[in-house]
Amino acid sequence: MNQLELFPEVDDVEQEVQAILARRRAMNVSGQAGEDIDLIRSALKSARGLA
């Protein structure tokens, strides 16, 4: 089950995080389990001026 289905009101950062994970799974590359997801989320928020 996708996290987006559990929480319908998801911001743009979380949508992009989910898209990154989906691309990793589709391309069968490292990081599919989201080991570095906190770093990615922080970087996205920082780039958008949210953090």
Image: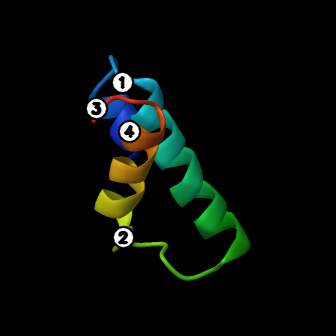
Residue annotated with mark 2: 36
Q: Which of marks 3 and 4 is nearer the N terminus?
A: 3
**Residue 9 pos. (x, y %):** 32, 17
Q: Do the residues labelled 3 and 2 touch (CB within 8 Å)?
A: no
**For discs 4 and 2, the disc positioned in front in the rendered view:** 4
Q: In which quarter of the image is the C terminus?
A: top left
- Residue at left 45%, top 44%? 44
Q: Do the residues labelled 3 and 4 touch (CB within 8 Å)?
A: no
Sequence-first disc among 3 and 2: 3
Q: Nearer the viewer, residue 40 or 10?
A: 40
N-terminal label among 2 and 1: 1
- The x, y position of residue 31, in whole percent, is 48, 76
Spatial CA span between label 4 and label 1: 14 Å
Residue 21: % across, % down: 52, 58
Q: Give the residue pinned by disc 1.
A: 10
Q: Name the residue under label 3.
A: 6
- Helix, strand or loop status at disc 3: helix
Residue kind at label 4, given as amino acid type: Lys
The secondary structure type at the circle numbered 4 is: helix
Q: Which of marks 2 and 1 is in front?
A: 2
Label 2 secondary element: loop
At 33% from the left and 29% from the top, the residue drawn is 50
Disc 2/disc 1 C-alpha distance (Å):
20 Å
Foreground disc of the pair 3, 4 = 4
